[in-house]
Image (cartoon, helix red, strand yellow):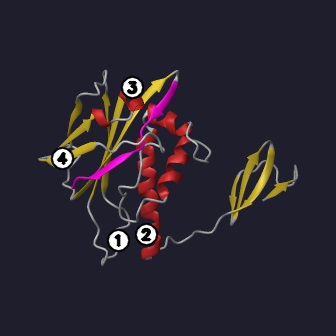
């Protein structure tokens, strides 16, 4: 980068061969035009791009929800903002061809592991046994379910430049939770499952608010396809 002294070139903004001129803070600045870089099509490069794209897609889906976005913003994960925290936390668990059941939609929180998941004819049924919930989660007011669908790539073939997948977040309001009962939910994924995918993972978390502060469960995940 070079700053051009006044009056040498007059008023100029644009490009000249491999030099780009821009006015910055009232000064004419010359930049060297970056050379074009070839995008590698090697398997390792495609794997890395797919992994990053999947993690970013997950982060965008989570961060689009106002509540989950605030939770990640206030989490202890070290990053600039909630969106970057989601990416940083999840990147270690994403594989080149798919997300895994180790990915999360909430930061580490109250343990929840008493969820039953069944699947039939594009319907996912969730059953949460309330008498096994931690006391804090009996005050939860939201249930988040993120459904991830994808087609498994053959590891013996060259991976596609873009992995085919679908991500959708489902949210349910929770009324007063009775510890003697169970919570039952049905999720219809018939519209999401077009075209038909051969693999699916559901990520589940419960969220509540107390004294103007959110509390949440860790993410429970289950591969249902």
Task: Tell me the distance, in whole angstroms, between the alpha carbons under discs 4 and 2.
Answer: 34 Å
Element under label 3?
helix
Task: Tell me the distance, in whole angstroms, between the alpha carbons under discs 4 and 3.
Answer: 25 Å
Front one among 53 and 161: 53
Prevalent SS, magenta region: strand
The residue shown at (40%, 65%) is 96
Which badge, 1 or 4, comes first in the chain's sequence? 4
When the figure is inspected, residue 100 is found, relative to residue 167, above or below; the finding is below
Element under label 1?
loop
Residue lying farthest to the left in this orientation:
121
Label 4 neighbourhood size at 10 Å, few (<14), some (14-19), many (20+)? some
Element under label 2?
helix
Q: Which residue is mark 2?
A: 46
Name the quarter where the N terminus is drawn: bottom right
Q: Which residue is mark 4?
A: 118
The residue shown at (23%, 53%) is 224
Front one among 128 and 91: 128
In the image: residue 181, left or right of residue 35: left
Which badge, 1 or 3, comes first in the chain's sequence? 3
Element under label 4?
strand
**Pointer 1 and pointer 2: residues touching (CB < 8 Å)?**
yes
Can residue 141 be seen?
no
Q: Which residue is mark 1?
A: 159
Give the numbered dot on residue 101. none
Magenta-highlighted residues: 213-225
Task: Tell me the distance, in whole angstroms, between the alpha carbons under discs 2 and 3.
Answer: 45 Å
Which badge, 4 or 2, comes first in the chain's sequence? 2
**Pointer 1 and pointer 3: residues touching (CB < 8 Å)?**
no
Q: Which residue is mark 3?
A: 139
């Amino acid at each position: 980068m070079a700053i051009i002294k006044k009056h040498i070139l007059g008023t100029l903004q644009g490009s000249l061969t491999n030099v780009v001129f821009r006015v910055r803070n009232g000064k004419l600045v010359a930049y060297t035009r970056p050379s074009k870089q070839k995008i590698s099509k090697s398997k390792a490069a495609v794997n890395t791009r797919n992994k990053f794209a999947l993690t970013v897609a997950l982060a965008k889906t989570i961060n689009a929800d106002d509540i989950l976005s605030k939770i990640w913003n206030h989490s202890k994960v070290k990053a600039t903002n909630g969106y970057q925290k989601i990416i940083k936390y999840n990147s270690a668990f994403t594989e080149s061809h798919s997300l895994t059941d180790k990915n999360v939609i909430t930061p580490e929180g109250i343990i929840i592991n008493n969820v039953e998941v069944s699947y039939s004819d594009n319907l996912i049924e969730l059953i949460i046994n309330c008498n096994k919930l931690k006391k804090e989660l009996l005050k939860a007011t939201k249930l988040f379910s993120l459904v991830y669908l994808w087609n498994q790539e053959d590891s013996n073939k060259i991976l596609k430049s873009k992995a085919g997948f679908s991500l959708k977040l489902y949210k349910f309001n929770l009324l007063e939770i009775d510890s003697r009962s169970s919570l039952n939910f049905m999720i219809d994924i018939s519209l999401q499952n077009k075209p038909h995918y051969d693999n699916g993972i559901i990520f589940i978390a419960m969220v509540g608010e107390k004294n103007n502060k959110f509390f949440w469960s860790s993410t429970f995940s289950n591969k249902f396809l």
